[in-house]
Image (cartoon, helix red, strand yellow):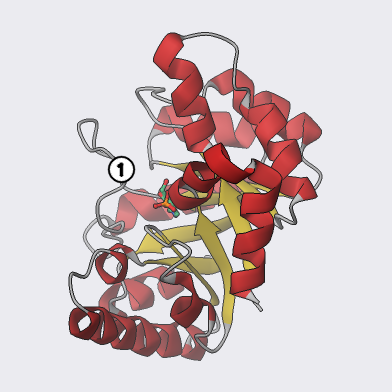
Amino acid sequence: MPKLGVNIDHVATVRQARKTFEPDPVWAAMKAELGGADQITVHLREDRRHIQDRDLRLLKETVHVKLNLECACEKEMLDIACEVKPQRVCLVPEKREEVTTEGGLDVAANFDRVQSAVKQLHDAGIFVSLFIDPDAAQIEASKSLAVEAVELHTGTYANAKSDQAQHSELLVLQKASEVVLTHDLLLHAGHGLNYQNVIPVAQIDGMEELNIGHSIIARSIFVGLEDAVAEMKALCS
Ligand code: PXP
């Protein structure tokens, strides 16, 4: 059964809409933990559109499960990560104008940059995963960087417009997952997963962790965060 990382960025999105103090992602993390989250995930973006530096620092103090920081391979972010020391960092690509993370990190094309980021994080004792497309070349490049895990981007699967297209994207994810496991990397996945599409991904052999944000926070508006997390956790199992 994969572990569930709950991404609470969009709690901060609502707060930042008014630049006020509520809802506080620190409260959200507590509710997510009560609902059964195995990990709290946040993305500190360069433009600080949702999670703020203060959130990350407080979450490091208050989260009792693992804290997973998503960030770009930028000096500012890496220095913050090494200072705050979340248990895990997932390196992601980041474009200022994007609505959400579009596509995986091109590890093969940015090898030296990613290598130096991984080294800095490893020197600080941080577990590193790379958010990549389900593609053998990216998995092999990740393996050669000696990271602990890769998170396969499930966005193309999640956005597929027909059952047939979704099925063929699931096959892509299954094939990539086999390559990940052959290389002795931990297998994570995420992006666009929701209550309707999560089960086939959770059932992939060797799936160790799913990171899910938007759908859980959206449901929490109606049922509360603790229940929204518990429902997702039940689907993952
Ligand atoms: N994993 C990674 C690396 C991400 O960047 C995101 C989005 O921040 C997610 C998972 C969660 O995606 P979603 O909000 O679509 O569930």
Quadrant of residue 196 in the image?
bottom left
116 to 142, vertically: above or below: above
Dot 1 surroundings within 10 Å: few (below 14), some, or many (20 or more)? few
Q: Is residue 209 left or right of residue 71?
A: right
Picture coordinates of residue 2, whole percent (x, y):
63, 73
Q: Quadrant of the C terminus?
A: bottom right
Picture coordinates of residue 36, whole percent (x, y):
75, 56
Q: How many marks?
A: 1
Residue at image x 63%, y 61%? Answer: 231
Quadrant of residue 170 in the image?
bottom left
Q: Nearer the viewer, residue 192 or 61?
A: 192
Q: Nearer the viewer, residue 38 or 88?
A: 38
Q: Is residue 47 left or right of residue 97?
A: right
Where does label 1 land, which residue? 100
- Helix, strand or loop at mark 1: loop
Amino acid at circle 1: Thr
Q: Is residue 124 visible?
A: no
Q: Establish whether ligand 1 lies closer than 8 Å to the Cβ of label 1.
A: yes
Q: Is residue 99 visible?
A: yes
Picture coordinates of residue 72, whole percent (x, y):
38, 41
Q: Nearer the viewer, residue 192 or 40?
A: 192
Residue at image x 45%, y 82%? Answer: 200
Residue at image x 25%, y 51%? Answer: 102
166 to 210, vertically: above or below: below
